[in-house]
Image: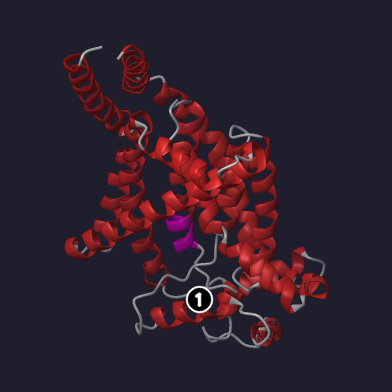
Amino acid sequence: MSMTGNTVGHAALQTSFATMLRAGFRAHGLFFAIVAVYYATVLYFLGSEPLGFLITMLASIALGTVMIVFSTFMARFVTLAVKERPDQPVKAISVDMWSLMSDRRRLAVGLPMIAVLAPFMTIFGEFKAAVPLFSGGFVWDQAFDNLDRWMHFGKLPWEWMQPVMGYAPITFAINFSYNFWFFAMWMVWAAWAFTTRPNVNRTHFFLTFMLLWSIGGSLMAIELSSAGPAFYSRIGLSPDPYAPLMDYLHRANEILPIWALNTQDMLWTGFNGRTVADGISAMPSMHNASSLLFVLTARHLGKWPFRLLAAHCVLIFIGSVHLAWHYAIDAYVGWALTLVLWFAARPLAAWWDSRPAANDLRDVIKSYEVQKATV
């Protein structure tokens, strides 16, 4: 092919990418509509500072981009190390990452979901910070404490766990796995967002994710406002059945760092207006709810992702109780909500995935692939 032919072919592919990107945004219209309704709800109940919201959203986009790149790198590095074992691992991972990140199909399909996630999680943060304002304070902690004791044969869940978990190295490992939830979330999100073949399973995951966080993380968090075991005495409740657990965590922190304690202190000072960090809400546990969602959707991602995310789900539950973040009932309600929304969202996902916009995106991608093969 001549230089002129190459130039024309390259230009054609450029045009095709622009076409794919437009088709990508149209195909994700349902998710943008959810964000619009979510934001309208914030405006109605809380009002909003447009500049502050924009700054927070841009920060969310920046953080999301870094997390997606890093999470993708981790996932691909493990895949190469375990399965392919190349002779030149640095070169192999560099070529692999460049191939993934320069794939125009992935960008056209994935960038709209980045544009969705940033404002969505920013709105969630606005709601979470306002939970005690809506409900007049944290009013359900004693009830959940009593319910936990009743459901677990007269003892609190942390008391059942303590003989096994009550060692600093184990607590440190549990805290590490609990913090890994952020990477797990971004790995699953990136795996679905940047697939080259949008399908109903992908739509199903994103739809359930957004419904879960807006209904569970906002509406139910307001109606069932609670602070969690770590803050039991700080919100004025006494006697505090979690004081021995907190004493143990502080002793363990003298041996190995238990990051949950610093985060809990940061959230409490933020709640009292002394830092920018805010947002205390225990019920339902979104860590546990979303971890189960990852397991449900991992069936479509492969055998090993499913096994790893199932183990991760168990560790998140243990960590949420052992680190005093949640009552066990927070996890049970979160799991129940996840299952309800998972099954309820499937018909809507199937309907949306059959709409012309979704079909157009797949057609444009297929056309691009054919075009690229002939250039």
Identify the residue at horizontal 57%, vertical 34% (top origin): 343
The residue indicated by pointer 1 is: 263
Tell me if residue 47 can be seen.
no
Q: Quadrant of the C terminus?
A: top left
Residue 70, above or below 346: below
How would you classify the magenta stretch by its main secondary structure?
helix
Q: Position of residue 285 (x, y in %)?
A: 56, 60
Q: How is the image coloured?
A: secondary structure
Question: What amino acid type should be assigned to the residue bearing mark 1?
Answer: Thr
> In the rendered image, which quarter contains the N terminus?
top left
- For the record, the magenta segment spans 217-223
In the image, residue 87 above or below residue 254:
above
Image coords of residue 210 (percent x, y): 43, 45
Whether residue 299 is visible to the viewer of this picture, yes or no, is yes
- How far across and down, in percent of the image, does residue 14 sit? 22, 26
What residue is drawn where x is 56% and y is 64%?
A: 179
Q: Residues within 10 Å of mark 1 (few under 14, many from 20)?
A: few
Magenta-drawn stretch contains 265: no
Quadrant hosting residue 88: top right
